[in-house]
Amino acid sequence: MMHNLSLRRQISRWGRILGLGSLVLGGMGADYAQSFAAERFSIPFSGVRFNLTIKDLEVYAQSGKLQGELASYAQRATPAQMAELRQILQARINVPAFAVSQFLYSNLGETVLKSVGEDLRTGANQNGFYGLRSAFILAAKDPEGLSILNILRLVPGCCINVNSERVLAQFRLFGHLMEITTTAMTGLEARAAAEIKAIGPIDFQKLPDLRQVGPVAWQEQTITVTDTKRQRQFPVTVFLPAVSRPAPVMIISHGLGSDRNDFLELAKHLASYGLAVALPEHPGSNAQQRLAFLTGLEKQFIRPEEFIERPRDITALLDELTRLSQADPRFQGKINPNQAGAIGHSIGGQTVLSLAGANLNWEQIKQDCQQELGALSIAVPIQCSAMTLTPEAINLRDERIKGVIALNPIQRILLGQASLQQIAIPVMVVAGSDDVVTPAVLEQIEPFTWLQTPIKYLTVIQKGTHNYNPGIGGQGGGAIPLPAALFGPDPALARRYLNALSVAFAETHIANQAQFRPFLTPTYAQAISQPQLPLILVQGL
């Protein structure tokens, strides 16, 4: 089971990176005001106002020693709260100052930080946006890394006043999210147990181990897709299996700020089971776009039109593969682009769901994004960047796509219930219970219940996070090294889960090989599940 404390820590860590945390000392649930000129701030807690100093916090972070009024404050807090406070104070993240600056001067960064600034207001009762931005940028120059304490030291002005009502409201949201996530995990475990009982025993010892590499050899090719109508060109890595008849095609769409190399392992694994696999690079939302943004060459972290252009990239790719299958000796007789499936991660999840029939829901976007943005996840402002687009009727469905796997997708705002209900092909949704980028309950579990397609699977990796490949391609490498906590306790195990389930889904629903169906059961998930990263699969909710 996922623990509330674990989720809170993950939220706090992600908040420190992006400036999303409304309370930098959030573990205690107290509202406070800070006077940085005197390195002092006050905390109203349990009817008493404590005057604390940054020095006292530094001593506590370094040695665990309680001094000054922090010692009195600790008497009213629980040991667990104080231990979590110390962990938060000790945490440091190495993020280049130029990267922090670029993010916080972008539209997305300003939106996020202004929301935080409503909670942390200046002595003149103004939004603390400007002081916080300068403090984050200056603190990022510290050779030892960005931390809560060096941010506190650098906020200009005499003081910061916390909007207590907003802070408490956000804590209630965090608490509610933790509670419903825990409840959801309990419910999913019960549902999986009931399905296992109904299915009956399956002897997987007599079946292939899909976690292992398959028996089929493959060749790697690189092609370039040029869409003259959109004036868009992008590279694609293709793996062609050595099979005697045209192979079904699986396309893998990378996440925001990543590249086509992120899921090379998955691509090669699928190819070893006789599937042709194509890895497109999406310009405008790839690692190159991220680096251009961080170095000041681009003003936007993501171009909002990418929500539309990425699915069109897949359609253009299928068109090009169709042409190559007829005209290029390398591809002739080796692929069947009319029998295709798609896998997408994060924003790539929205990409493949749109290809499956869930178009952008302009009414939902307007409804959700006109409200004040919450700070529960970065997925909200990313999706709401679509507000700058001109609403128009766009059909992104590609009939050649016969089934999709959405890994940690963003979808709640961009697609919504009405659009997801339009999907009629098989869908697998994969979530991580500790995902703080696209929280599982908000972005995967509840939206899964909106699907009305008769064939659907929900897979949850308990203790799993948003990312799978630390240090590979765009997810873990590049200009901003992400902390290990954002990759979960065992990313290699998570990838093995993905490898096996992706083969089972693709063989069953794209290649129409019914003998793989037993692997798409909660019984199989239970059979391969490991304690450090428990796996749940259900066939409906």
Image: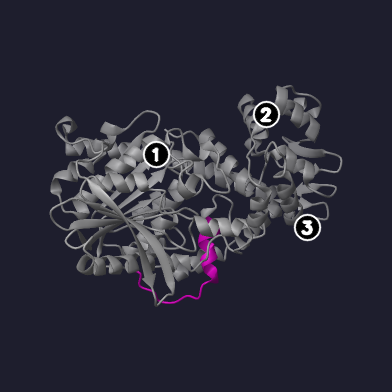
Q: Residue at x 61, y 27 (%)?
A: 80
* Residue 105 spot, x, y in % from top left: 67, 59
Residue 32 visible here: no
- Alpha carbon of mark 1 to alpha carbon of mark 3: how far? 41 Å
- Alpha carbon of mark 2 to alpha carbon of mark 3: how far? 30 Å
Q: Please tell me whether mark 2 sits on a helix, a strand or a loop.
A: loop
Q: Residue at x 55, y 71 (%)?
A: 388
* Residue 378 spot, x, y in % from top left: 55, 53
* Residue 201 spot, x, y in % from top left: 17, 33
- Of mark 1 and mark 3, the one earlier in the sequence is 3
Q: Examine the rendered structure and indicate whether residue 168 appears above or below residue 340.
A: above
Q: Which residue is mark 3?
A: 126
Bounds of the magenta span? Answer: 380-396
Q: Which residue is mark 1?
A: 185
- Alpha carbon of mark 2 to alpha carbon of mark 1: how far? 29 Å
Would you say residue 118 sits in the magenta stretch?
no
Amino acid at pointer 2: Ala
Q: Residues within 10 Å of mark 2 (few under 14, many from 20)?
A: some
- Of mark 2 and mark 3, the one earlier in the sequence is 2
Q: Which mark is residue 77?
A: 2
Q: Quadrant of residue 144?
A: top right
Q: Examine the rendered structure and indicate whether residue 37 appears above or below residue 230.
A: above
* Residue 135 spot, x, y in % from top left: 74, 48
